[in-house]
Amino acid sequence: MTVDKKIIMQTKDLTIRFGGLVAVNNFNMKIEEGELIGIIGPNGAGKTTIFNMITGVYVPTSGSVDLEGKSIVGQHVSHITQKGIARTFQNIRLFKDLSVIDNIKLAAHYRTNYSLFDSIIRNKKFKNEEERIYNEAMEILKIFGLEKKSTLLAKNLPYGEQRRLEIARALATRPKLLLLDEPAAGMNPKETNDLTELIRWVRDHFKISILLIEHDMKLVMNVCERIYVVDHGEEIAMGLPKEIQNNKKVIEAYLGTSDEEAL
Amino acid sequence: MNIEYFSHLMIMSGIFIILAVSLNLINGICGELSLGHAGFWAIGAYVGGSYGVFYALPLPNFLNLAISCGLGFVAASLAGLIIGVPCLRLRGDYLAIATLGFGEIIRIIIMNMDVVGGPRGLTGIPKWSNLPLIYFFVVITIIFMANLVRGTHGRAIISIREDEIAADCMGIYTFKYKTLAFVLGAGFAGIAGALYAHYQEFISPNSFSFMWSVIILIMVILGGLGSITGSIVGAVILTILPELLRFMGETISEWRMLIYSVLLIVLMLLRPSGIFGKKEFNVLALFSKKEAQ
Ligand SMILES: Nc1ncnc2c1ncn2[C@@H]1O[C@H](COP(=O)(O)OP(=O)(O)OP(=O)(O)O)[C@@H](O)[C@H]1O
Ligand SMILES: [Mg+2]
C-alpha cells in the first residue's frame, strides 16, 4: 500500500518570456514533503529563472506556482519567503558588510515581536526578543560550524564558508522548501563532499524539502532522489539519477553544448 | 571669540547635526538617494514657526517648543510619505529625481503663500529655542538613530542598502522599511526646522535653497555614509569651517562652495568612504577592548 505524500510545491505550465526569448516554457514540476530534488541542464537552460519565478523575483508570463496547494504567483518575494520558500543565490548575495550573526538575525526579522517604539526605548520586551533572536542565530551558526566567526564581517569569510553561511541564513527563515542555486560552485572536492553530507543532514534534521540546481554531477547523482533536466527552457527528462544518466536526450543535450561535465 | 558668537556656532552645529544625522538615515543607512532635505527642513520651520506666530498657547516656552517640534515632525514626515510612497515602490533613482524637484517646489509654494509672508518671509516667530533645549533634541535624535540601527527595524533598513533582493528573500518587505527610513529622516529634518525657526525668529524661502540640501549631503558624505558619528562630525566641521573662512576675509568666504568641492575631492582620494566609513565611535568600546578580542 502506498500513501501519497503531501505535495509541498508544484508548478503548472510555468512560462516566462524576456522580449522575444522564451526563457522557460511550460515547465511542470512537483515536490513532495521531504523530497530532495535536482534540476540540471546546460548553461543558459533556464534553471535560475525557474528559481526566480518560484520565489517571486520574476513574475511568470503564464502558468502558476502553488505552495501547499495555494497559488503564490504575483505575491511579493518577502511574503513568499514568509510562507515557506527560502533560497540561496548562484552568485552569493550575503549582506557583505554586516557581521555573520547579523546576516542570520535578518532572517528572523519577520518573526520578531517588538515594535519600533520598543526598540527605541529598549524595554524588556525588546531585550527578551533580541536575546531569543541571538540564541536562535547562534544555534544555526553552530550547526554550520560558524559560531566562532559570528562577529566577523560576512565578506571576510573564506569562500566555502560564505556559501555555508548563505544556506544557514536561508534556513533561518524557517522554510518548508529550500532552493539551492549551485551550492557547490567554486568549492574544492573536499568542500563539495562535506556539502553533500550537509545537504542530506539538513533535509533530515529540519524535515524540509530541498530543490537544488547543480553542475557538479557527482553531487547531484549522490544526493538527489529525482532529477529534472532542462534544456532551452523546457523539460527534456525527469526521473531517478540512474534513469537520467542513461537518458539519450540528456546525453545529447550535454554533448550538443560545450559543457565539460559529460555524464 | 565672545561667548554669544560661540553659542551661536554651537546652536547652528546642533541644528545641522540633526539634519545630517536624519539625512544619513535615508542616504547612508538605507542607501536611497534623497536630494531635497532642505525641503523637509523648510516644512518643519514654517509649520513650527506658524504655530509660534499664529497659534501659540499660553504655555512655558519649552512646552511650546516641544509642540512646535512635534508639529514640524508630523508635517515633514507626512510630506515624506506623500513623496516616498510612489517613488520607493519603484526600483532605481526615482527618489533622487523626485526629491530634487520637491525641494524647489516647496520653496515656490511658500513664496506664493501670503499668510506666511511669501517671499518676504515669516517674521515675529517667538524665540523659544536656546542652547540647552536644542541640544536636548540633538541628544534625542542621536539616541533614536543609535537605538534604531541596533534593533530589527534598523537592521532591516541596513539590509536594503546591502542587497535589496537578498533582503526581500529574507522575508523583509523592503518597501515598508525604505518608506520608514525616508519618513523618519524627513520627520527629524522637520524638528530641525522648528528649532531653527524658533532660534532665528525670522525665516524666508531662501533660507532653504537647494544649496542647503547639497551642504547637508556633503556633511553626511564627509563623515562617512552610514555612520551616525560621521554625520555628527561632518555637521560640526561644515558649520564651523565657513566661519573660519570668514575670518580669513570676504573673498575666501565667497569661494566657500569651491573650497567644499576641493575638500570633498581630496577626501574621496584619501578616504573614499568618508572620515568614519560606516564605523561608529563607541565610548563603551574604548573600555572593553580586551573583551572584544
Ligand atoms: N532578466 C532577464 N532578462 C533577459 N533575459 C534573461 C533574464 N534572466 C535570464 N535571462 C535569460 O534566460 C535564459 C536562462 O537563464 P538562466 O539564468 O535561468 O540560466 P541557467 O540555467 O541558470 O544557466 P547557468 O547554468 O549558466 O546558471 C538565458 O538566456 C538568460 O540570458
Ligand atoms: Mg543559473
Image (cartoon, rainbow, N blue to C red):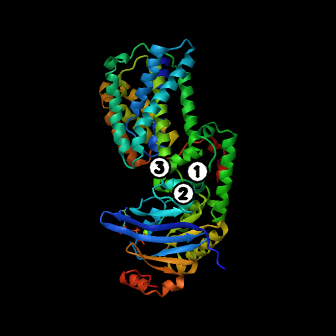
Q: Report x, y in % for residue A89.
A: 48, 64
Residue shown at 46% from the left, 39% from the top: B182
Instruction: Give the residue pinned by disc 3.
Output: B161
- In the image, what residue type sits under mark 2? Thr
**CA gap, disc 1 and disc 3:** 18 Å
Q: Are marks 2 and 1 on the same chain?
A: yes
Q: Are marks 2 and 1 in contact (CB under 8 Å)?
A: yes
Residue shown at 43% from the left, 48% from the top: B271
Instruction: Give the residue pinned by disc 1.
Output: A110
- In the image, what residue type sits under mark 3? Arg
> In the rendered structure, the residue with mark 1 lies on which chain?
A
Q: Is mark 2 within 8 Å of ligand 2?
A: no
At label 1, counting other C-alpha atoms closer than 10 Å, the crowd grade (few under 14, some 14-19, many 20 or more) is some
Q: Using the image, tell me which numbered label, if any, was put on residue A81.
A: 2
Residue B259: image quadrant is top left
Q: Is residue B30 visible?
A: yes
Q: In front: B156, or B149? A: B156
Assign a secondary structure to mark 2. helix
Assign a secondary structure to mark 1. helix
At label 3, counting other C-alpha atoms closer than 10 Å, the crowd grade (few under 14, some 14-19, many 20 or more) is many
Residue B217: image quadrant is top left
Name above or below for residue B253 compared with residue B128: below
Which quadrant of the picture is home to ligand 2? bottom left
The C terminus of chain B is located in which quarter? bottom right
Of badges 1 and 3, nearer the viewer stands 1
At label 2, counting other C-alpha atoms closer than 10 Å, the crowd grade (few under 14, some 14-19, many 20 or more) is many
**CA gap, disc 2 and disc 1:** 10 Å
Q: Is residue A189 visible?
A: no
> In the rendered structure, the residue with mark 2 lies on which chain?
A
Q: Report x, y in % for residue B98.
A: 35, 39
Residue shown at 53% from the left, 24% from the top: B134
